[in-house]
Structures are given as C-alpha cells and as structure tokens.
Image: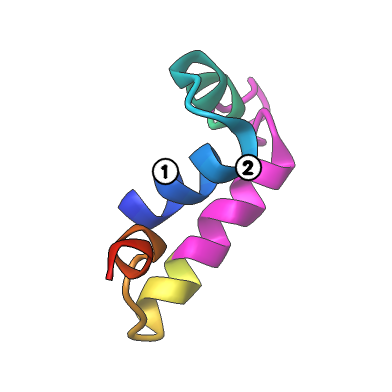
Amino acid sequence: MSDFIWQFGERAGDDLLTLIGDTGLEADGQPTDPAAWDDWLASVRHIRSGQLPRSDREQA
C-alpha cells in the first residue's frame, strides 16, 4: 500500500480527499477512477516481483 500511496502522491499530490475519492467504488462495484485502480494493480505487481516500494528506493 505504501508504494501505491507514494505513487499517487507523486501523480496527484498529497490531497487525502482526492485519494479517498479516486479509490472508492461506484454502486456497480467499479472503481470511481479506473486509472487509480490501474495504479493499484501496478503497485501490487511491483511489490510481488520482489522490488522495494518506490518510496524506499527514493530515500536510498
């Protein structure tokens, strides 16, 4: 999750309300912002591949 939040902050800024709004679900079960869902899936793939969260890489 930290990888996704870091990536979101880099792309959309540090606005918590935007994060919550973009990651919500519509009544039909679809994400409010499909791009945020794609970003989440990319973060999951990134971590599952054994890579460090991007936030950790940036500090190293």
From this view, report whether residue 21 is shown above or below residue 55: above
Q: Secondary structure at mark 2?
A: helix
Residue 10, x across and y down, in percent: 55, 44
Is residue 1 inside the magenta stretch? no
- The amino acid type of the residue labelled 2 equals Arg
Residue 21, x across and y down, in percent: 57, 19
Q: CA distance from mark 2 to mark 1?
A: 10 Å
Is residue 31 inside the magenta stretch? yes
Residue 8 vs residue 31, the one in the foreground:
8
Image disc number at residue 5: 1
Q: Are marks 2 and 1 in contact (CB under 8 Å)?
A: no
Res 18 → quadrant: top right
From this view, report whether residue 1 is shown above or below residue 25: below
Residue 60 vs residue 2, the one in the foreground:
60
Q: Residue at x 51, y 50 (%)?
A: 7
Q: Please identify, in this view, whether the residue under mark 2 or under mark 1 is nearer the observer.
A: 2
Q: Dot 1 surroundings within 10 Å: few (below 14), some, or many (20 or more)?
A: some
Res 53 → quadrant: bottom left
Image disc number at residue 45: none
Q: Is residue 22 visible?
A: yes
Residue 4, x across and y down, in percent: 45, 51
Q: Residue at x 61, y 47 (%)?
A: 37
Q: Left of 57 or right of it: where is 31?
A: right
Tell me the quarter of the image containing the C terminus.
bottom left
Q: Residue at x 48, y 27 (%)?
A: 14
Q: Label 2 belongs to which residue?
A: 11
Q: Secondary structure at mark 1?
A: helix
Residue 27, x across and y down, in percent: 64, 20
- In the image, the segment drawn in magenta is 24-43
Q: Residue at x 72, y 42 (%)?
A: 34
